[in-house]
Amino acid sequence: MDQDQALQSAVTKAARRLVPFLALCYMVNFLDRVNVGFAALSMNEDLGFTPAVFGTGAGIFFASYILFEVPSNLALHRFGARIWIARIMISWGLVAMAMALVSGTTSFYLLRLLLGVAEAGFFPGIVLYLTYWFPSRERARVVALFMAAIPLATVFGGPLSGALLELDGALGLKGWQWMFLIEGVPAVLLGFVTLKFLDDRPEHAKWLTADERTALAARLATEAEATRVTGYHQLSHAFTRPRVLMLGIIYFCLCAGLYGIAFWMPQVIQTFGFSPLKIGFLTAIPYVFAAILMVLWGRRSDRTGERIWHVALPLALAGLAFVWSAVSGPLLPTMLALTLVTVGIYAALGAFWSLPTAILTGMGAAAGIALVNSIGNLGGLLAPALVGYLREATGDFTAALFFLAGSLVLGAALTLLFGYAAHKRSESYAK
């Protein structure tokens, strides 16, 4: 087997072994993060939460999540992915189950903050981990496959959450308490599996042949060295380079739409008078299309080698669809608009995460990926709260949906600006 064949064989084996397992873990992660949106269908009334209180509690998760994001990713780089990812999963699963103990505004805010601490570093840690295994030409496809777990979390989690809410009154517990208890268990179990299943680097993978380990490690080392020349590898680079900060701002705009739709879509659909179970199934529909098109769009980005338009176009589509959803009226056009929103946001995700991994390596990647994710998740902190306040102030979702639309269109414009600046930079290197 020559080196190119060994490399391709190693990449194929790594994709088959790692991506499905990591996607399953991320599916559980995202469900435990956003299932509060389904809990709100009955929890808000049971505990007397206003839209503003719920929006603040949904978003406050990101305050602690952002604060601990960079330290968590540096710890992963220091101690290894296997141990650190397992630690994250077990701790967040326990806190997710403890959400069943919410009894008022204070405990709601406190447990959401603790969930943010527990989950901090999981997503950027996985993105960093994937750079240890996959060459740059494979990353948009691989990241899209991994991140397809987000829409799939709602495809399966929406009906599941709706069904668990129907357990209201069983053994003296509310339906939303059953939902938190049951949906938190898989994270704990998968955390223990992670300790046995993951390998930190290709060099440690006994399921690769010696030739495959050597070929993959050599390619990754060559790319890392090239990135040291044209990109950022020092810890200080992650915090001082405008390109890294610009990516964080773009991701902020994307996350505002992502979490705006994730936390509030069940309540938008509830305005049509459906039961929790029917809301769960209706919420799943946009995510079925998003999961499929997200992977196809990521493959197209890898095949063409183009990244900027593969981010900007779907973000612009999602922004325009948000505007349509605000004025669409009946259920069918509203669902179609929300489907286009969801497809656009998730199609942009896979291609987006190929951008920071292309300019960051080493300790710079550990800190930089976490920083981009932290800045982006400020959108998750602010957008749900602002949506709640706008709904409470106006009595409907129209103004909130226009706000989310503007955020995504701004993200598309900034992506094009980033691409233009990168083109000028590459021209200067060529000279």
Image (tube, grey):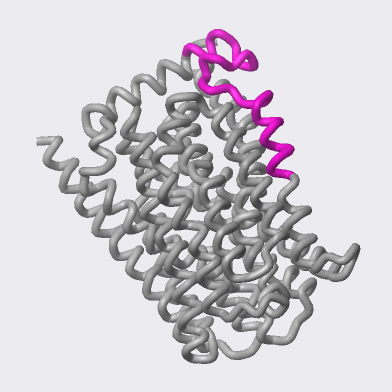
Predominant SS of the magenta segment: helix
The residue range painted magenta reads: 186-214
**Residue 83 image offset from top left, x and y in percent:** 57, 27
Which of the 4 image quarters holds residue 32? Answer: bottom right
Residue drawn at x 87%, y 66% is: 172
| Vertical placement of residue 372 versus 407, above or below | above
Quadrant in the picture for the N terminus = top right
Q: Residue at x 59, y 70 (%)?
A: 105
Vertical side of 393 occupied by 51: above or below: above
Residue plotted at (53% across, 72% down): 55
- Residue 259 vs 137, above or below: the answer is below
x, y (%) of residue 73? Answer: 44, 36
Drawn side of residue 98 relative to residue 53, left or right = right
- Is 271 one of the magenta-colored residues? no
Instruction: Answer with left or right where residue 79 lies relative to residue 312.
Output: right
Question: Which one is nearer the viewer's eye here, 272 or 38?
Answer: 38
Answer whether residue 210 is magenta in the image: yes
**Visible residue check, residue 21:** yes
Residue 314 visible to an observer of this rendering: no
Residue ranking furthest to the right: 171
Q: 211 and 161: which one is in front?
A: 161
| Quarter occupied by residue 208 | top right
Quadrant in the picture for the C terminus: top left
Q: Position of residue 15 (x, y in %)?
A: 59, 32
Q: Residue at x 68, y 81 (%)?
A: 270
Query: At which x and y percent is residue 135?
Result: 44, 29
Q: Is residue 45 left or right of residue 50?
A: right
The answer to whether 257 is drawn above or below residue 247 in the figure is below
Give the quarter of the image for residue 163.
Answer: bottom right
